[in-house]
Image: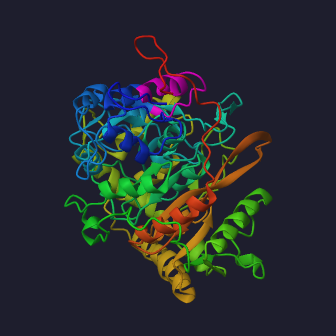
Amino acid sequence: MVAAAPSAEATTPLKLDDAPLSNIAQALASGQITATALTKAYLARIEAYDRGGPALNAVRALNPDALAIAGKLDTSRPTARRPLAGVPILVKDNIATGDKQPTTAGALALEGARARDDATIVKLLRDAGAVILGKANLTEFSNMLAVDMPGGYSSLGGQVKNPYAPALMGEHGIPILTPGGSSAGSAVAVAAGLCAASIGTETSGSLLFPASLNGLVTVKPTVGLLSRAGIVPIAHSQDTAGPMTRTVRDAAMLLNVLAAKDPLDPATQKQRRPADYTAGLARDAMNGARIGVPSDPADPLNDCFYGKLLPDRVKVMTETIKVLEDLGAVIVRANMPTLGWIGGPGTTMAVLNRNPLSEQKGTVARPPVVFLYELKHDLNLYLNTWATNTDIKSIADIVAFNEANAERALRFGQDHFLAADMTRGDLSEREYKSARAMDLLSAKTRGMDAYMNEHKLDAVLFPGATGAAIAARAGYPSVMVPGGFISGTIDGKDTPDYPLGVTFAGRAWSEHKLLRLAYAYEQASNKRKPPPGLLAPWTSPAGKRSALH
């Protein structure tokens, strides 16, 4: 909780474990709290729960200048021009900051590496008054280093834990319940109340999956809505950053700040956005909307999104659909065309799984061709144009470094990087061009477009992150909202109840519509609950207990 400033009238304290960003901004604007007090409070929670207590390990490194930045903002107040003045925000450690903080993508090979400048989205956050609190841990190189690397693990940052079930199992310390990947640290930090909000990234599921498992709202934007300049890449065809928040309104507030054209990212030149993403967030926004449920029990072989759901997930989705119907939505049940979800010929590459800790070691994994070919091209470009204070300038340098430091760097291998390094790196190969064209044909033209056109849909409803790949390949947006809780057994271990999100996906540049639909559902369902056991008193530096928790 955040105590009122001495000059402020008595107000209800903020519970930092669950306070929406919008409430925090209001408290700053009213003078109820200061940026310094707020930053100290989050640093105390990080010390209590990320470094101590359950040791969630969501924050890879803190910004050494965070308190100094906050101090300069103590006399500022959030305004329309600077809506985040004094608000502490974490960014994923693949997002460049041109300050004292390294930008490492969680890789031992990039330990100590810095960036020549702030990523464009970091500049926008700073311009809006945000306090960059630090860098969030992640799955190393956004989960493109190795086959079967656990979500939230990096050789530099270690293993992120899910706050709803933080236990690890076995001698190798693998989470019983994954925190998701690759934006695991970004998600866990928001879920555990370690920051007001965070920024993650996604290529295919890396915002949606951890948001689902940590009970959060996220927006996976249309590719090009947010600049990627200064972000350690996987594949420019699908890469995007996105906000991770506790409420839909908070996500809309951050999109207002982050969605801007950038000459450093040509994809943003096609951008279409409203003046205000928070406009029209209303409880009646679902009335009359046509929501596609890609499920037809009469055609079970094509019922890929709902047909194999476990009973507890079926229950959550049944309740979700009932809420939507009660809100006046028109539910359209029909399978999505098969080509829309299986991809097409030549879109995956055979990669031998050498991961020593994988149960599938010795079998063939099939990552997307587009990822592997664009990875070498895009990562080499980042290393040569953005990275400083490092001798690593190519994916080949990373492979060589990891081999030379295998005991620390190759716990789970580097099979994807080995495969990527065998490509030319200039995207000239016919197999790459064919794979990208087939991705668009199957996911966009014959997938989302055909499905939404045929049924005249406003959005498509997916359980959890099951629709991540089809929307990501098409470059289309998704908005996730907490949908409920599930429980069960994972790998033979019982787990506490943990969250399951629901996703509203739509056409390019439809974020505003999706946010309005998601807001109506969120307000009617109210399914988010913070992780248990993470509320404890914060002691002020003077040793007095404060109403800040």
Q: Is 397 or 543 nearer to us in this picture?
A: 543
Please tell me in which quadrant of the rendered image residue 502 appears: bottom right
Any magenta on residue 54? yes
Boundaries of the magenta span: 41-59
Any magenta on residue 69? no
- Going by the image, does 65 lie left or right of 222? left
Residue 455 lies, with reference to residue 191, above or below; the image says below
Q: Position of residue 108 (x, y in %)?
A: 42, 32
- Going by the image, does 382 lie left or right of 40? left
Q: Residue furthest bottom?
A: 454
Q: Position of residue 547 (x, y in %)?
A: 49, 25
Q: Is residue 202 visible?
A: no
Q: Position of residue 281 (x, y in %)?
A: 45, 64
- Residue at coordinates 24% horizontally, 46% vertically from top-left? 123
Q: Is 205 or 122 nearer to us in this picture?
A: 122
Q: Residue furthest front?
A: 9
Q: Is residue 359 visible?
A: yes
Residue 9 lies, with reference to residue 297, above or below; the image says above
Q: Residue furthest top?
A: 543
Q: Position of residue 134 (x, y in %)?
A: 37, 33
- Residue at coordinates 59% horizontally, 30% vertically from top-left? 534
- Residue at coordinates 33% horizontally, 39% vertically from top-left? 30
